[in-house]
Amino acid sequence: MSVEEEGNAETEDCWDMKDNGYGQYELCSFPGVTCCGDDKLLQLYCVAELSPLDMVDMYHGRTDPTGYCASWMGAHLFLEAFCVSEESLSSASAESLSGMFRQRRVLELGCGTGISGIALLSSSVTRPSHVTFTDADPAALDLCRTNCQLQPWSTSQSSSQNTVDQSEKSDVSVVDHNGTDSSFAICPLQWGTALGKNIQQQTSNELEENDDLDGSKTNNNHDWLLQSATYETVLATDVLYDIEALIPLLQTASDLLLPETGHFVLSHVPRASISFSSGDDDDVVSSREVLEAAICSEAARHNLQWLPHCTIRPEQLMK
C-alpha cells in the first residue's frame, strides 16, 4: 500500500467528519487492485496510522478510531484472494469463491473505510449486483461515503436522476453505476439488534411504502435495507479484534442471510498466536486453531456451516 499526501485541505473540511481521532486523512493507493478493469489503482481516504493519543483513548475506552485506518491485514488478504490473486488458486476454487459475490446482493458488516465492498464493486470479475455498507460508527459511514464518491463508477453518475444528493447525509445513500446493474447503499447497523422482517413476508400495502430493493430508489429510513433473510452474501473483514463481538456478529450475519443459499465470508487474522499445552508435551495447539474452532462452533449455533474447501490460508496467497 502506498500513501499520498492530499494537498487540498478544503476537501477534508467539507466532509463534516464527526470524529476521526487525532489522525490525519491521507489518500492511499492499493497496488494490484484496479478500478473496473482499467489501469487506475484503487484509492481511498484513510488514516495512515493511529497516533499515540488515539491508542491512549482506545485503552481507556473513550474512542475506537480503528475503522478510519488504512485497511487491516484481514482486508488486505481478502483483496488478495478475491480481487488480485485468483490466478494463484485452483480454477475450481477461484470460480467457487468468485461465485460468492458475482451478481449477488452483498452486505458488509463493520465496513470502516469501505475498502472491501468498494474493491468488489470495482472488480470486473467479482462485482456484486448490490452492496450495502454498514457500520455502527457514523464517522466511519461518512468516510465510506466519501470513498465511494471518489470512485470512477460513482462520480460518473453525478448527473444521473438516480443519484442521491449526498449532501443530505441521509441514512441511506444509493448510487447506480453507469452502464452496469450494480448499486450500493450506506446505512448504520449495530450488531445484535433486531432486524426488520423479510420483505417477502410483508403485505402488499407495506410493500408500497418501501422502495425497490434493486437500488433504483432511496429512502431516509434504512429499514428496507436491513430486512431479515435478504442478502445472498454477508462480508466482514478483520472485525474480531474483540472476541466478545463474535456472538452478535454471527447473530446479525445469520439473520441477514438468505436461508440455504446464503454465504457469510469472514476474513480474519488472529491478533496473537500463542502456543499452549494441555499438559502433554506432544499435544500443543496454537491459539489460532483454538480460535478458529471456537468461531466454527459458535457459527454452527447460528445455523452457519463452515466450508473447509472454501477456506483460504495466507500461505496460499503468498506463493
Image (tube, helix red, strand yellow):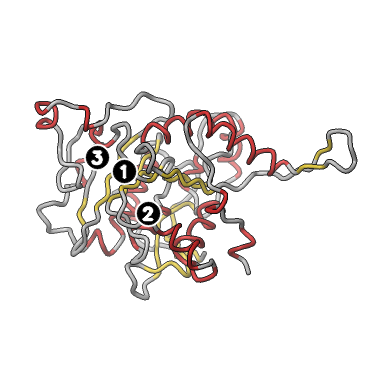
From mark 3 to mark 2, how far is it between C-alphas? 22 Å
**Residue carrying label 2:** 101
**Residue carrying label 1:** 16
**Can you tell which quarter of the image residue 312 is in?**
bottom right
Q: Using a 10 Å C-alpha cutoff, classify the residue at mark 2 as few (fewer than 14 neighbours), some (14 to 19) or many (20 or more).
A: many
Task: Give coordinates of residue 221: x percent, y percent.
Answer: 21, 32
Residue occupying image coordinates x 44% and y 58%: 96
Q: Earlier in the sequence, mark 1 or mark 2?
A: 1
Report the front residue among 218 and 56: 218
**Can you tell which quarter of the image residue 209 is in?**
top left
From mark 3 to mark 1, how far is it between C-alphas? 17 Å
Report the front residue among 30 and 229: 229
Residue occupying image coordinates x 63% and y 34%: 294
Which is more foreground, mark 3 or mark 1?
A: 3
Please tell me whether mark 2 sits on a helix, a strand or a loop: loop
**Left or right of 68: which side holds 217?**
left
Which is more foreground, mark 1 or mark 2?
A: 2
Task: Give coordinates of residue 141: x percent, y percent.
Answer: 35, 42
Does residue 267 appear anywhere in the picture? yes
Q: Using a 10 Å C-alpha cutoff, classify the residue at mark 1 as few (fewer than 14 neighbours), some (14 to 19) or many (20 or more).
A: few
Please tell me whether mark 1 sits on a helix, a strand or a loop: loop
Is residue 40 shown above or below 294? Answer: below
**Residue carrying label 3:** 172
**Left or right of 157: which side holds 112?**
right
